[in-house]
Every structure is written in structure tokens, then in C-alpha cells.
Amino acid sequence: MANILNYTGESLKEKKIRLKNGKIIDVYIPSPELIKAVHLAFQVNRPLLIMGEPGCGKTRLAEAVAYELHGEKMYDHFFTWNIKSTTKSQDGVYQVDTLQRMYDANIKDDKVNDISKYIRYGKLADAFMKEANGDKSNILLIDEIDKADIDFPNDLLLELDEKEFEVKETGETIEATSNLLIFITSNEEKELPPAFLRRCLFHFVDFPDEEQLEDIVLARCEALKKYPHFKKALEAFEAIRNNIDKNDKRPSTSELIDWFQMIEYYNSIRSNKNLTKQEKDLIEELEKFEEIDNKGMIPYSQILLKTAESRNKYQQNEQSEK
């Protein structure tokens, strides 16, 4: 049994963090169920497969855990393998640089006889071989696994199960040097094979309730705590989301944050004297939304509505409200 993982989910709840290298780790507020899923995955030494609609924060969980465990050293112990449609399982393990070897052979370089000089390790191997930060686990994120070919997940079964792989060209076996917590995200674009699912713990990230949404927005847009129309804006967002068919692109927490950041910005500059025409127009859009009798129109709808179908439906609803 693995040691208890000390992840509380508290470290990024109140403000974003700027690391010494300049990178910014944004606010992240996990649900209690998500925190529990992280602990269970660590305890049973299994990857945590996270599903949910795009923009719900699946990818950022791994970053948040890495920051809470490692702080300023997080990027020394946090590895991201971004999956594409052309990605093969071998890409994450190792490749032999045959082109460099051919070049060295042509110039009669002595090292050409040592194939180990041409092994190029991938992100999965990097995570395996990295020494731990004391008793704190390394973190590997395999992001959007459903983008790859259907055989891709099954090709990783041994590596995920045994936390090791063999370099066939040298006969060397590479084992994970320390505790390793693996996060795998999926947008459910493809079904994942049963043999792969058996080796993972699973958590679906539900869309936040009203109280959670309020916490998420105010953690990023503190000025809106004094905005008198905040509740109205939150209700308008939820109405937009609820009126869009599940098969269409509903606005996620990512769009929610973008939208409220625009509200925060244009609310903050409305008293400025030297505004451009475009800024005045966008502030006017916000002011129309704030009118007491306005029910159908919302400002900056382009941020929330991403398809022609949802846009048309919104415009029809807006006309009916008038």
C-alpha cells in the first residue's frame, strides 16, 4: 500500500501563484469528490482517468496537485504528454534516433557502435526515471488520450500496470524510480477499451452547482464581489447553458471565467474619460444587460455561444423576450 498522499485542494483556492521562473499557476477549486478520487488513485497505485466536457478543468487538476506537492519545484516533477491523432504509445517511451546514427556512421564516428547513445526518451520515460522530491510523488499527465488511435490505450497496458518498460535495443528495463501518480484525461471522443479501463480509477467532472460557480468566479474576479448585478449575470449564464441542447457545445467553466473577466473589465473602466468608440459600445452592451426590465439579452454572447445553432436559438429567445 502506498503512503498517504497529502493533497488537500487548498493551495490554489484563493489566488493564482507566480513561480520564480515566471510561470503562473491559476486558481483551481476542486470538488471534495475529486480530491477523494486523487487519494484513492494514489492509494491503489492506479492511473486516474478523468472525463468531462471540454473546459471543465480536467487537465488543470494534475497541475494543481503538482503545485501543492512540490511548490516552486513542481516543473521538475510534473510531466505532460499531450496526445494527438498521430501519437503512438512508443512516442512516450523511447525512440532510436536512426538519422543521427546514419550521419555518425557516414563520418565514421566511433560512438555509432553504442546504440544507447541514440536512445531518445519520451515523457512517460522521463516521469519514470526522475528521482522523487523526498517522499512526494512525481506527476504524469497523459492529456486527451481519446485523440489517439483506438489501439493506443491498449499499447500502454504494461507500462501503466507495471510502471516499467524494456529498451529492446539494449535489453535494459526502466522502472519508475519513485511513487508516480498518473492522470489521464478524455473528452469522450472515442470509447476506451475495457482492458484499459480496468487498470484505471475513474472520475467524471460534473458541472459545478451555483455555489461552486460563484466561488470559481469570485476567486478569479475579486472586483465582482461589489458588482451589484453579479447574481443576475450568474443566473443569465446558467440560463444560457440550460437552454442549449446537450449535443451542442454548452459553455463550460472555461467560458464562464472568460465571460466574467470581460464583465469585470468593462465595469471597471466605464468611468474613464478617454474611452475609444469600441470600448463605449462594449460598455453600453453591459449597461443594457443591467437594465431592470432586460431578461433576454446578455453581453458578450460571442464568448459563450460557439456554434451557429446555439447562436440562432439564443437570438430567437432574445426576440421572444422583447
Image (spheres, rainbow, N blue to C red):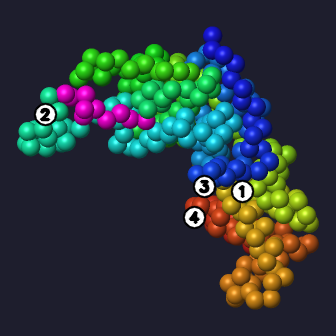
Three-letter code for the amino acid on which mark 3 is drawn:
Gly
Determine the residue located farthest toward the front in the rendered image: 110
Three-letter code for the amino acid on which mark 1 is drawn:
Leu
Three-letter code for the amino acid on which mark 2 is drawn:
Asp
Q: CA distance from mark 2 to mark 1?
A: 59 Å
- Identify the element where label 1 is drawn: helix
Q: Which of the marked residues, 2 or 3, is nearer the chain's N terminus? A: 3
The residue wearing badge 3 is 22
Question: How many numbered badges does the structure rendering display?
Answer: 4
**Which residue does the image show at 14% across and 28% down from the upper left?**
113
Q: Depth check: 96 or 44 in front?
A: 96
> What is the number of the mark on residue 110?
2
Q: Quadrant of residue 311?
A: bottom right
Q: CA distance from mark 1 to mark 4?
A: 19 Å
Q: Depth check: 81 or 321 in front?
A: 81
Q: Nearer the viewer, mark 4 or mark 3?
A: 3
Q: Which of the marked residues, 1 or 3, is nearer the chain's N terminus? A: 3
Per the rendered image, the range of residues in magenta is: 114-123
> What is the number of the mark on residue 256?
1
> What is the number of the mark on residue 308?
4
Determine the residue located farthest toward the top in the rendered image: 1
In the displayed structure, does residue 259 sit left or right of residue 76? right
In the displayed structure, does residue 321 sit left or right of residue 38? right
Q: Residues within 10 Å of mark 4 (few under 14, many from 20)?
A: few
Q: Depth check: 17 or 143 in front?
A: 17
Q: Which of the marked residues, 4 or 3, is nearer the chain's N terminus? A: 3
Q: CA distance from mark 4 to mark 3?
A: 39 Å
Q: Nearer the viewer, mark 2 or mark 3?
A: 2
